[in-house]
Amino acid sequence: MASPIRILTAVPICDGHDSAINTINLEFIRHGIEVVYLGYHRSVGDIVRAAIQEDVRAIGISSYNGGHIEFFAEVVALLREKGAADIKVFGGGGGTITHEDAAMMRRKGVDEIFFAGTSLDEMVKFVHQRYGKPRAKRARAKSSDIELAHKLTEIEDKKKIRNSKFGIRNSCKTRVIGFTGPGGAGKTTLIDELVLRFLNKDRQSRVAILSHDPSVIGEGALLGDRATMINSQNDRVFMRSMATRGQAGGLSPATHDCLALLARSGFDYVIIETVGTGQEAMPFQKNGIVDQTVLVMNPDYGSRLQLQKIVMLDLADIVVVNKSDLQRARTAHTEIEQRLEQNRRAQCLIDTVAKRHRDSGVDKLFGLISTSDKSKRGKERKSHEQARTGR
Ligand code: B12
C-alpha cells in the first residue's frame, strides 16, 4: 500500500481563531493524511525548517491575523532559497482573505487558498489529488538536512532495508536516549527542556529527535509533538515525527532503521520518544537500540497496585516523576521508590517539573544522560543514589 500523504500545518499568529486549524487537522487525519502540526506563533523560518526535516509534501497555513500575502509569499520564497521548492504551500483564513488577495498569493507561488464556505470534503479531495501522486525524481539535496530528510522518507516508505543495512552502533560518539511513558506525562516538554541544556552545554553540538505518535484508524495521524516544542525549533536540532503506521508497542515499523541512520549522521545525541505507552510496553527491548532508557511517569497513576503492572519500571535506567509540583507527587515518589527497590538494580528516580524553566530536577536528569563516559555516568548515578538513600 502507498504510504500516507504527509503535510505540515501551522498558524503564524494565533489571535483567538484557532478552531479552524483544529477542525482541518482532524478532517485530514480522518481521511488518511499524516499531519505534522507545528502549532501557533510560528515564524517563516520555523515553518520551513520543520517542513524540510519532516519532508512533507505541502505546508497548510491557517491565517486570520492579517499580513497573509507577505507571510505566505515568504514561506514560498524561503523554501525555494533552501532548495525545497518541491514542498508546496496552501491554506486559508476564512473571511480574512479576499479573492483579490488570493489571486496575488497564487501569483507569488501559493498553490491554493480556500475561502469561507468551502466544504471540508473539497479540501481533503484537493490534498489527495494534488499531493497524493508519487513524487517525481528529486534533484540532488542542497543541504544535509534535506538529504537526511529524504533518506528517512525512503526508509519509512519502502521499509525494505529493515534491520539489515544499518547497524546502530556504528558511531561511538552518538548517544541514543529513549523516552517512554504514558500519554500526558510530559515527555515532550521534558525532552524540549533537555534539548535546551544540550544546546547550551556545547555550542557546537547537534541533537536529533525521533518522535512518535499513533496512527489512527484510517491511517492518518496527528503528529503533534512539535507544537509543544520551543527550544527544539533550532537549526542545531533535527526533528522527525513518525506515525506508528499499524505497529503496536510505541514505535513504527521503520523506527529501527531511521534511528540507525540518525545515529550514523554525526549527531551528538539522538533522542527517541515513543507514543504514550501502556503497562505492557517495552519499546526499547529489541536490538538494543538505545544507550539509556527513561520512563516518564505522571504522579496520577492510580493505586500502588498499578505500579506492579508497569513493565518499564523493571527495565528503565531512569524513572522520572514529572509534574512533581502536583499534590500527589510525594506519595508517588515514595511508592515508585519502593517498587524500584524490588528490582535490586541500579535505577535512578528523579522528580521534575518540566514546564518550569531551570528546574533542578531536569538539571539532575540532564547530568545523568549527558555524560558520554560510561564510568563517569556510573559515578554520577552512584552519587545520585547516595544522595537519595543517604547511604
Ligand atoms: C468563529 C469566529 C470567531 C471565534 C473564534 C473561535 C476560535 N476558537 O477559533 C471568536 C468569537 C473568538 C472570534 C473572535 C474574533 N473575531 Co472572528 N470569526 C469567527 C468566524 C465566524 C469563523 C472562523 C472559523 O474558525 N471558522 C471555521 C473554519 C473551518 O472555517 P473558515 O474560517 O470559514 O475557513 C475556511 C477556509 O478559509 C479554510 N481554512 C481556514 N484555515 C485553513 C487552513 C488550511 C491549512 C486549509 C487547507 C484551509 C483553511 O477552511 C474553511 C473552509 O470552509 C469568522 C468568519 C469566517 N468564516 O472567517 C470570523 C472572523 C474571522 N472574525 C472576525 C473578527 C473581526 C473577530 C474579532 C476581532 C471580533 C471582535 N471585535 O472581538 C475577534 C478577534 C479574535 C481575538 N483577537 O480575540 C472577522 C475578521 C475580519 C478581518 N478581515 O480580519 C471575521 C472574518 C468575521 C467577519 N466577517 O467580520 N471569531
Image (cartoon, rainbow, N blue to C red):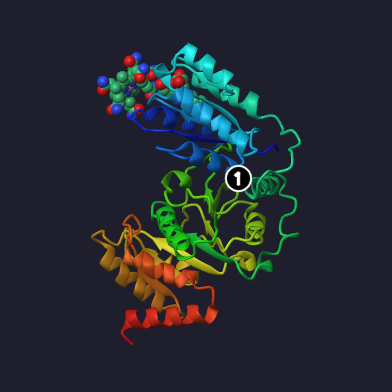
Q: List x then y, in percent, for residue 363.
A: 37, 67
Q: Quadrant of the C terminus?
A: bottom left
Identify the residue at image location x=31%, y=66%: 332
- Specify whether 120 is left or right of 319: right
Disc 1, SS: loop
Identify the residue at image location x=38%, y=55%: 185
Instruction: Give the quarter of the image for residue 267.
Output: bottom right
Q: List x then y, in percent, for residue 33.
A: 57, 34
Comparing 337 with 307, the one in front is: 337
- Specify whether 245 is left or right of 98: right
Identify the residue at image location x=54%, y=43%: 49
- Specify whether 300 is left or right of 69: left
The image quadrant where one finds ligand 1 is top left
Q: Residue 6, can we see it?
A: no
Q: Which residue is mark 1?
A: 245
Comparing 229 with 198, the one in front is: 198
Q: Quadrant of the N terminus?
A: top right
